[in-house]
Image (tube, coloured by chain):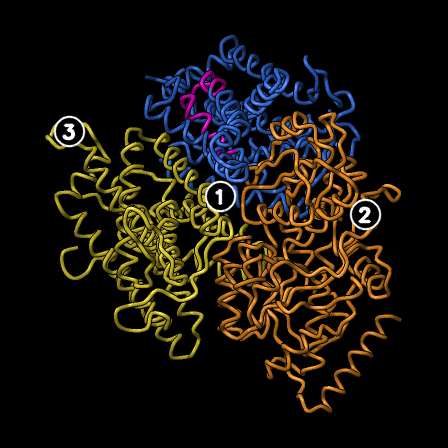
Amino acid sequence: MSLAFLIEQLLNGLQFGVMLFLMAAGLTLVFGVMGLINLAHGSLFMIGAFFCSWIGEVSGSFWVGLGGGLLAAALAGAVIEIVVIRRLYDRDHLDQVLATFALILILSEVTRWIFGDQPLYLDVPPLLAGALPLPGGGGYPIYRLAIIVVGLATAYGLYLLITRTRLGMRIRAGESDREMIGALGVDIRTLYTAIFALGAALAGLAGGMVGVLQSVQVGMGEPVLILAFVVIVIGGIGSVKGALVGSILVGLTDTLGRVFLPRLFALMLPTAEATAVGSALASVTIYLLMAAILVWRPRGLFPVGA
Amino acid sequence: MTNGLSREQVVNGSLLALLLAAPLIAAALDEPFYVSLATRVAILALAGVGLNLALGYGGMVSFGHAAFFGLGGYVAGIAAFHAFEESAFLTWPFTIGGSDQLLVVWTVTALVVALVALAIGAVSLRTSGVYFIMITLAFAQMIYYLAISLPTYGGEDGLSIYLRNQLPMGDSAEPLTFFFVCYGLLLLALFVSARLVASRFGAALQCARMNEVRLATLGIAPFPVKLTAFVLSAVITGIAGALFADLNGFVGPSMLSWHRSGEIMIFVILGGVGRLFGPLAGAALFILLESFVGGFTDRWQLILGAVLLAVVLFARGGLIGLLAGKLRHG
Amino acid sequence: MNRGLRSLTLGVAGLLAGLGGAQAEELKIGMITTLSGGGSSLGIDVRDGFLLAVKQAGAGDVEVLVEDDARKPDLAKQIADKFIQRDKVDILTGIIWSNLAMAVVPASVRQGVFYISPNAGPSALAGKGCHENYFNVAWQNDNLHEAMGGYVQSNGFKAPFILAPNYPAGKDALTGFKRYYKGTVSGEIYTKLGQKDYAAEIAQIREAKPDSIFFFLPGGMGIAFMKQYAQSGLDIPVFGPAFSFDQGILKAVGDAALGVKNTSQWSKDIDNPANKAFVDAFQAEYGRLPSLYASQGYDAANLILAAKAKAGGTGDAAAFRAALQEADFASVRGAFKFASNHHPIQDIYVREVVKEGEVLTNKIVGVGLTGHANAYVGDCKM
């Protein structure tokens, strides 16, 4: 096993983690400020990917498509918030889970209605095509490096937004005392809509970028949604910092588990069995990680309001 | 209401009577499909009754009850598989063969599910709120992926149960007989739930839901109370899973998927959380929607979603709440 | 003109059957297939191909009920019960996925209905679990992988890297490939079912330095793999079964698929009159090119119609079964026969993904295996 191989796998884990962060950031913000569990977050990811692909094809430019996908997701988020989500803030988690589960069904069918049953296509923008050489041979796709950069930049942007801006101040105020912020004369309804739309936009951004790597199809948001939940639970729900640490941890664990567990078992078992056992175990490593962390710290790595 | 029956009791009674009458009429008209549809309602309601014990009364929002439902199904499937193949499940340190006896299957299901639920519960109950929701989901996902990659028992293809597991008397393959078995178990579970909720244990459980500290000051540790309720809840759902596998003649990882957990939760919420008969009303409505709307449009999931959303937003307290009025906290 | 010829043949066959004493009866067919959610494009194609054939035949006494299984095994089972017990169908068909087939088929055929599979062909139903009322008109699941194994072997590749998802069909795929590829492999990976990111696997491929890649990753998994592979800078020839390179999915894979060799028992450029007529009629009816799945739905319907013409209907089950086994219909694949375990004996072609104008499509470049049956014939005792 060469060094280049190890570097490449670490980059893969980091890229996967950063992508998860874009999903998890919105989820954790919405939970931190409004106390809402949103299962339909994956649908916003899907909407971003679909619009990015569609607008990209019509306009002929990936970048216009990505902007369009981000806006479409933000807009969809705002509409959903105003029509449905707003009524769920003072309900218990159970009602929230059921209502947003229902939203998944509705949004999936509506998307299918608009875009049809065939998966859509989204290509790498020419600017980011190709691979960069790695030390010791091999190459790494530029596009994946770009995802890492965009993700880390978004994390830094969020940090600035929360610590330096008026909106950020209100978000922090909302996290610590929801009633008080209303009493201070802040238009809480608009604030909530804005936060929800912000989370949706991040999901849409992730969807558009991932659409280049994967197939753009109905239901693409659900596996990512579950992983994003694992991330925010590990990080501590409501904590953006926790989401960042959690997502990179999950990204690395999953990638390295997939690569090294089968090899580990190959030391003890015949190849075919080792691959089977190793792969089976690799598919549950992140859940094991999550269970272990929760046993150790029941409120995640960076508990909020503790 | 002091004299006669309360409105909720009337609603509950009517639901039970309807569920009993439907297959009898269907059998009389020689429409066996509706008998199996009613059996399906009874089984899924049973799964919901199990979850309701944890979720409705104990406030433990488990998003992983599909794990227990699926485990029950796999016990039935694996027992039947070994009985059919005449092979052994375990040869060392002692031999365990298959079985095609329902009573044996149920006993083993209860034991296996109880053990697994004890382990999952012991870990998960250290957390609460959203963390609890997500950690139960995580455990269910683990079992789901293990089932997919287990080649011996079919992996993703699942296992077929060629001959329905047998009763000591009566023919379980006869649709009406099997319906009565499921209906009977549903009644039993409802009865046990009702007695439990009314008991001292039930009072402690509901107190643990509302205020753990208060319970602790009374000298009752909340953890064992909640864990016991969680395990019992899992066992009931597990038995439902075993019945479901026998009804379908099939068990596969889809019984363990997170969508299934969501569905069982939907039965409970649709019917009315913390209502004894909520899961029955919810399961019945869900199956009717799925079965009849699915018959005339491919867009049935859209309609299902809209109905669910409407219930959450506008009919708090679910179907039973709609029919019988608000829940009064005594 | 061809359509006229077909209905004429059907008419004559029907007349002959009538003279033979069999009464023409109503035929009720229940189609359970995936029309919503992920993978619905496969079910829609099977349905459209099937209904096109029924429409062309102008068979007024054939009724087709269609219902969506949403890819859930227990829902499929419930619909099957409904079709059999309430609607009293004679034939079931339509299921796409092996796990749904395993939930529905064994119990259904034991209740006396026929099941004609237009897609799913798990080994369990071809070997020990075969049944006299179960016919698969598409393939045994291993077929396309076996043909690719043979092709890779005969083209002198020495070190293929092979990968598939970790579930029964994935294991069958790699076993099937190795059944006809006798050399050594440079690596073998089972991925998580539904996985969409293959960066880690592609790095392993790069490290293993293979001379070719064989993969079976149906649906969105394959789209993701091909796109990521194209971006990785690797340039090793890729081989696979048709699933990731078929008409319905090619547009989503994009130019990354160009030049990939894939195996299929059907292609739109197979040169026979039935196929030409099918491709034209399908395009005229639905405004898109037919896919592999559409061809399977179309063949399934024509097989049933031909058997009905011969035996009158399912009233005499033995006669209908014999008529199915004879498979006396003009398959769009050309020569078509059933092996003794009711799975096809057919040629498996090797196609290459090419561009016709702006449209990505496939062109036949060779034959993988000729007159190929399956490895389970001997295990089936009917």
Magenta part, dominant SS: helix
Please identify which colour was used for chain B in the image. Answer: yellow
The reply to whether residue A71 is in sight is: no
What residue is pinned by disc 3?
B216
What residue is pinned by disc 2?
C362
Quarter of the figure with the N terminus of chain A: top right
| Chain appearing in blue on the rendered image | A
What is the three-letter code of the residue carrying label 2?
A: Asn
The answer for which chain carries disc 1 is B
Q: In which quarter of the image is residue C266?
A: bottom right
Residue C102: image location, x then y, percent: 52, 59
In this rendered view, identify the residue nearer to me: B228 or B73. Answer: B73
In this rendered view, identify the residue nearer to me: B226 or B11. Answer: B226
As displayed, is residue C20 above or below residue A231?
below
Q: In which quarter of the image is residue A180?
A: top left
Residue shown at the point (10%, 30%) measured from the top left: B219
Region rendered in magenta: A225-245
As displayed, is residue A15 above or below residue A220?
above
Residue shown at the point (76%, 35%) measured from the top left: C237
Is-magenta flag for residue A24? no
| Horizontal side of residue C199 vs A26, given as left or right | right
Residue shown at the point (43%, 55%) measured from the top left: B251
Tell me the crowding category of disc 2: few under 14, some 14 to 19, or many 20 or more residues within 10 angstroms, Cα based.
Answer: many
Both on one chain, marks 2 and 1?
A: no
| Chain appearing in orange on the rendered image | C
What residue is pinned by disc 1?
B149
Dot 2: element = strand
